[in-house]
Every structure is written in C-alpha cells, then in structure tokens.
Amino acid sequence: MHISVNVDGVRHADEVEPRMLLVHYLRERLGKTGTVVGCDTSNCGACTVHLDGHSVKSCSVLAVQANGHDITTIEGLARDGKLHPVQEAFHANHALQCGFCTPGMIMQAIDLIADDPSPDDEAVRKGLEGNLCRCTGYQNIVRAVQDAAHRMRPGAGPDAERVQDEARAHHVVGGE
Amino acid sequence: MIPAEFDYQCPSSVDEAIRMLADAGEDAKVLAGGQSLIPVLRMRLAAPSVLIDLSALTELTGVRDDGDSLLIGAMTTHYEVQRDHLVHEHARLLFAATNTVADPQVRHRGTFGGSLAHADPAGDLLAPVLALDAVMIIAGPNGRREVPAAEFFVDYFTTALAPDELLLDVRVPKCSGWGAHYEKLNRVAQAWSIVAVAAAVQVSGGAITQARVGLTNMGSTPVRARAVEDALVGQPATPEAINAAAERAAEGTSVGDDYKENLARVLCGRALTSAVTA
Ligand SMILES: Cc1cc2nc3c(=O)[nH]c(=O)nc-3n(C[C@H](O)[C@H](O)[C@H](O)COP(=O)(O)OP(=O)(O)OC[C@H]3O[C@@H](n4cnc5c(N)ncnc54)[C@H](O)[C@@H]3O)c2cc1C
Ligand code: FES
Ligand code: FES
C-alpha cells in the first residue's frame, strides 16, 4: 500500500506491506535507527515516538496507520546542532546508563511535560509508567524530567530552547 | 515478531465498513486503536486475512450529551475520555477507571469501544460499564440493535457482537453528582488488574440512596455485586455500613479463589469509602 508520512519534518512517500510496523518503517526504510525496539509485548516504551504530537509505541502502530500523519522521532528533536532541553537535562542529570531506554524516555518525557508543565515526583513516575529502564533505578530520570520541566516552564520564552554552557557546567559538576 | 500477511482496508463510512466486513467473511478483523490487536497479531495468536481500520470513521469519535445519557463513540480514545468534561460531570466512574488503564502511550491510541469489544475480563472499563447499566449500540448487515451491558459480555474475550457487526456507540446513563471510585490492585506499572472494584454511590442527607458496584477479573465476564448494592441502599454513609456491605462483595462470584475473593471484599471497602467522600 502507498503511504505518505511526514517524519521529523520531511515528507516521505513509500510503498509498504500493510503488516509493516511503524518502528520497522522508521528504522529499516528511513534509516532512523535512533528509535529502538526493546520488547515483543508492547511494554517497554523504548520505541516511543510522537504521532501528531502525542506519544505512541511505534511497535504497536502499523506504518499504514501513520499514512497522512506527522511523526516525530528522537532524531527530530535537536535544532541547529543544539540538543532539545529534555535531551540536555538527561545528559546533565546522568539519567542514563546503557542508554537503550533513553530515546523512548525522552519522547515520553516531552509528552508528559506538555500535559503537566511542572510535574511532581509522583506525576513524573506515573507519566513514565509505559517506559521501562533496566539500569538506572529511575531516580536520575525523574530528576532530569523535573529539571527539563523547569527549563521549559511557561514564561521561560525562547531561552527554554537554548542550551546554555553555564547551565550545563552547573549541572554536570557535582549534581545539584 | 511481525504479523502474518493481511489485506488492509480503510472504509470512510459505517455502511461501507459493514459492507467490507460482510464481503471479507469470518476471517476479517476490525482494527480500532490496535493496542490489543496488534500485540496479538505480532505474537501470531491471530492471523486474520483482512483488517478493516475504523480510524477514518470520525462519527464514532467523541462524547455527546443525549438528555439522560451520554453517547460515547466506540472510537473515542482513552485519552479523550480522560479529558472530556461531560464524562467528568456525568460519568465519574468511567473517568476514574480510564485513568488506571495501561500507560499514556497506550491511552493515546486505545479506544473505549475496542476495550469493550476485546472483552478481556481484566479490562478496566467492563465493570464500570456494567455497573452503570450502559447499553451497546451495534450495527450489522441487518441494521442496528441495542444490547444492555449485562447481555453484551458473554465469556472470556467473547461478546454479543457477531463477526459481521460493529460497536458504534455506548449509551451511558448519567450519574450526575454521584461519588465514584475505581480501586485497582496490580503489582507492577502498566499491569492489568488482579482484581478491581468499580463503585458509584448517590448520597443524600448523609444516607446512601443509590449504589452501583461492579467487579473486574472475578470471573469470565465482569460481575455486578448486587448483594453489596442492596446492602447499601437506605443505609447511612458511615464506615460501619460500608464495611458491612463490602463483606458481601464476593457473593455470587465463582472464581473459587480465596485470595481473589478476599481482595474483592477489601478493595470494595476501599472503593466505597473513597466514593462516598469523592
Ligand atoms: C502494555 C499494555 C497495557 C495495557 N493495560 C491495560 C489495562 O491495565 N487495563 C485495560 O483495560 N486495558 C489495558 N490494555 C488494553 C488497552 O486498553 C486497549 O486499548 C484495549 O484493550 C483495546 O482497544 P483498542 O482500541 O486498541 O482495540 P483493538 O486492539 O484495535 O481491537 C481489540 C479487539 O476489539 C475489536 N474491535 C475494536 N473496535 C471494535 C468495534 N468498534 N466494533 C467491533 N469490534 C471492535 C477488534 O476487532 C479486536 O478484536 C493494555 C494494552 C497494552 C498494550
Ligand atoms: S518495543 Fe517495547 S514497547 Fe515498543
Ligand atoms: S539506561 Fe539502560 S535501560 Fe535505561
């Protein structure tokens, strides 16, 4: 079947089998290997992308269901060589170890901050319920999401999208 | 794994969908949010030859005010139900239960109608729909029919829907001003209920005037806890009355499992306690 999908701001027209999963379309056809597959059961969330601005598990969506829609992957977040504030916060707060869950965690974190601009601990944990991490124990992930939410808080203006060297230095050295 | 091969069709009206279902025969499957069906296809537990995707049927999406009831379209997502002001106001039990379904990603795709049609006895929306005396509006080659929730859920993963029928809407009688709570026990994040209790109560002048209680995963279908409801009506909304009624939660169930029966009683007490103060 013929599909036309906007992925990370670029329109792609392709012929796909109806049974092709969106995650395989992204990885194998478009080479967007930043989005990964971590399970066979729709549980891990490593494959999370945004479909029309909302997080979905791309292993549980068919490529044909994305026909005519907009997809954003982890590869579409950086601007002009600068990381997205959520990516930056994960880096600054050591919110990853092996990094396998990270693309999905970041995509879901962006979704959760859009719904709740200043989430408390409980809200972050609930919002990341569909994303599993086998390494970190989640503490630094929760910290990173709250840090990112703070950087992106309403009224933060265009600066929220800008990564400042000063902020980076402050957070990398000695945590808090 | 990836699914076995199938044809994919995307009808643009309910009539067209019904025609496609009839033409495709028994081997066709309807695709709603895909959050149960796609995992099943990936594990090759099912291999339909045709998938009929309902996503273009915008008339099946959204919640409408229909006088004494709400009409909830089958294709309304869990996420949309969570944010709908009519659901907040008139069907708080549904709101409370939907909040506990799966995780945010699954709630963005999964649909109200898909959950009911899938009829997993551990599904969280079945007991609320049963407790609220909702009615399923179904379309097939011979026109439309209405089936009350009590007759809709037939067995594990089995409903009154024929293979050539579609669930269109669910009519949910309004319970405006009632207290409601969904108490779910699961062990880990995004897990299904081991047991859960759906409770809605109307309290007037300190007394319980009406009560609705449904049980999740206490049998092959959702179960109505009639004994609890009968024990509550006319009683003062006190902890003593609630605890006495909750003791009867497992009456009439046939799971034959002491642990789950005990859970039903304990969770029923908690659900009612929260509902009367909600
Ligand atoms: C990780 C994970 C965790 C989950 N946890 C929970 C949970 O805790 N509680 C819970 O309740 N659910 C849970 N779910 C299931 C989720 O709620 C699904 O959304 C729901 O079961 C199915 O809805 P769907 O729209 O995705 O239906 P689909 O998967 O598209 O379809 C399911 C079935 O219903 C049929 N169907 C769908 N719509 C119609 C219709 N309109 N008419 C006729 N037949 C139809 C399909 O043919 C199919 O057989 C979970 C799912 C996942 C992946
Ligand atoms: S790969 Fe695990 S949820 Fe998609
Ligand atoms: S960092 Fe390894 S799985 Fe999360």
Image (cartoon, grey):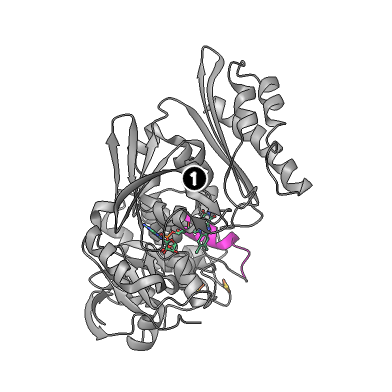
Q: Position of residue B191 (x, y in %)?
A: 59, 58
In the figure, is residue B21 to the left or right of B99?
left
Residue furthest to the top = B205
The part of the image, by quadrant, that contains residue A52 is bottom left
Name the residue carrying label 1.
Answer: B151
Label 1 residue SS: helix
Image: B160 above or below B178: below
Query: Main SS type for the magenta part?
Result: helix
The part of the image, by quadrant, that contains residue B226 is top right
Residue A125 on the magenta span = no
Image: B141 above or below B146: below
Image: B132 above or below B28: above
Q: Quadrant of the N terminus of chain A?
A: bottom left
Give the magenta part as a residue range.
A135-147
Q: Position of residue B195 (x, y in %)?
A: 64, 47
- Amino acid at pointer 1: Glu
- Report the residue at 28% width, 74% height from top: A8
- Report the residue at 70% width, 20% height from top: B240
The part of the image, by quadrant, that contains residue B10 is bottom left
Q: Answer yes or no: is residue B214 visible.
A: yes
Residue A140 on the magenta span = yes
